[in-house]
Amino acid sequence: MVTLTEKPWLKHYPEEIPATIEYENKSLQSYLKSAAEKFPEKDALDFMGKAMTYRDVYDSALRLADRLRSIGVKEGDRVAIMLANSPQAVISYYGALFAGAIVVQTNPLYVEREIEHQMNDSGAKVMICLDLVYPRVAKVKEKTKLEHIIVTGIKDYLPFPKNLIYPFIQKKNTGIKVQLAYNDRLHSFVDFIYEGAPLEVKQDINPLEDIALLQYTGGTTGPAKGVMLTHYNLVVNTQQCQEWMYKIEEGEEVILAALPFFHVYGMTAVMNLSIRMGFKMIIVPKFDPKSILKAIEKHKATIYPGAPTMYIGLLNHPDLPKHDLSSIKACVSGSAPLPVEVQNQFEEITSGRLVEGYGLTETSPIAVSNLIWGKRKTGSIGIPWPDTEVAVLSAETGEPAGPHEIGEIIIKGPQVMKGYWKRPEDTEAAFKEEWFLSGDMGYMDEDGFFYVVDRKKDMIIAGGFNIYPREIEEVLYEHEAIQEVCIIGVPDPYRGETVKAFIVLKEGKNVTEKELEEFSRKHLAAYKIPRLYEFREELPKTMVGKILRRVLVEEERQKITEAVGEQK
């Protein structure tokens, strides 16, 4: 049995952060109801100049819930949401929960193959999506259990005259103009909500057991799995976030919502936290450094959760000196390792605090973070959050490892998932007793600070997105010219890592990098497409023919070391 006799990190907690919290036994959507009652006329969000009060958002969410129930959505049914950051994303999320449904967050960048798998695995009955992605959804609808599709566009919640101009800009930038013939199975989001009644649906929710969210995560040994996060999991992590950021004030902060809500980090640390605390969200549909700089200055944003690439993008933008970012109080960076120089430079410019956090989809997601106002260590991911136990599992003893001894990081806490959707074997394999096995290798120092030394298996993190090599390899293996392929991540100064493909061609076959990119684009989301290609006569293998990925990784590291040496 894995037991912790000591928790050395607790001695570093400021007196404002409790070691244990009394968590609310309530549904996640109750946050919106409470905020609407407490701050009815306060702006809940601003979307490119269009403001909505908490009363407005609550009213819209209830209307959506009423209409979802009218088309047959029952408690426990799955409702997929495939939206960029927008008022519709917030309304859809809480509206689905008010209807008693389980939210299935779906990345708008997904291609048909990915959409089809996620819809079939989750069994979603309803999809709420952007007009731009509707053609992809329509192509796979008949292969899924989707009964209704509700479509919206960015223009639907823009102020006048932006709502009139935007469709022309969208067509110019994307080449796509979607014209739909709505019917009893295909609905306009705005009309659909308008027809609903703003009445709360009676629900019998058990927050500890009932699932609020299926958040899909990729896997190196198979297709994407649905992580079951209960209402309690998400409520707990939101409260933990509030306690960790103890200097934030209810109803007073302005949070910049650039992290995508379809990502569990953006969902918890931005949307759920903001709704719980009565903050104002400045919603950005797509990360653009110039727009972010303007938004921080214009709205006096005080909190800006992000990923390292977002901070790097701001720091390297030529317009940076023209903008005042001094309103920033706190930023927690996630999704990828935070470079120390980025942290230091950002803090110098803003006078706020930027720290790195660590977690996984399976932990709702945050489990460990450096203190925003307190002791922190360079290179460390920080210390565990309240009520969260973290240990490094020794491969030799099966018990917690000693200081600086490298092993697998394991996590136990009330924010840890219920399990994987319809995958009991995978769920069992992911736990050792009550401890979740992260798959990340790391160590703890004598002060209780944790460090990650290796990524989860072969996962690549590029621009904050988790990318799994096997998925890309399987797609490329479908190309008629490819005999062997191996995907690795190589260091990238902006994205953190970028995807590189090592390829062996079939005898007598030829293919160009451009042709491979076009082929990949048909089967993979844009961020998964290899940016670098290297053609070889053969790939390194074991005696039994298994490709040695780690050898290729080491070769790339050696190239970088030699290049740095030559520059010196």
Image: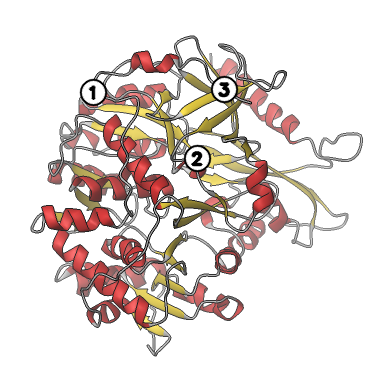
Count of numbered badges drawn on the protein: 3
Give the side of residue 518 with respect to residue 451, left or right: right
Report crowding for label 1: few under 14, some 14 to 19, many 20 or more residues within 10 A (C-alpha): few
**Mark 2 vs 3, N-terminal side:** 3
- Residue receiving disc 2: 360
In the image, residue 132 sits, relative to residue 295, either above or below, namely below
- Residue receiving disc 3: 3
Callout 1: helix, strand or loop?
loop
**Mark 1 vs 3, N-terminal side:** 3
Residue 419 appears at what percent x and percent y? Answer: 56, 49
Q: CA distance from mark 1 to mark 3?
A: 27 Å
Report crowding for label 3: few under 14, some 14 to 19, many 20 or more residues within 10 A (C-alpha): few
- Residue depicted at x 27% and y 39%: 304
**Mark 1 vs 2, N-terminal side:** 1
**Amino acid type, residue under disc 2 in the picture:** Leu
**Amino acid type, residue under disc 3 in the picture:** Thr
Q: Quadrant of residue 294?
A: top left
148 vs 402, nearest the viewer:
402
Seen from this angle, which residue lies furthest top? Answer: 446
Residue 42's disc is: none
- Residue depicted at x 59% and y 69%: 120
Residue 250 appears at what percent x and percent y? Answer: 15, 41
Callout 2: helix, strand or loop?
loop
Report crowding for label 2: few under 14, some 14 to 19, many 20 or more residues within 10 A (C-alpha): some
In the image, residue 509 sits, relative to residue 64, either above or below, namely above
- Residue depicted at x 67% and y 46%: 220
Mark 2 or 3: the one toward you = 3
- Residue receiving disc 1: 16
Q: CA distance from mark 1 to mark 2?
A: 26 Å
**Amino acid type, residue under disc 1 in the picture:** Glu
101 vs 552, nearest the viewer:
101
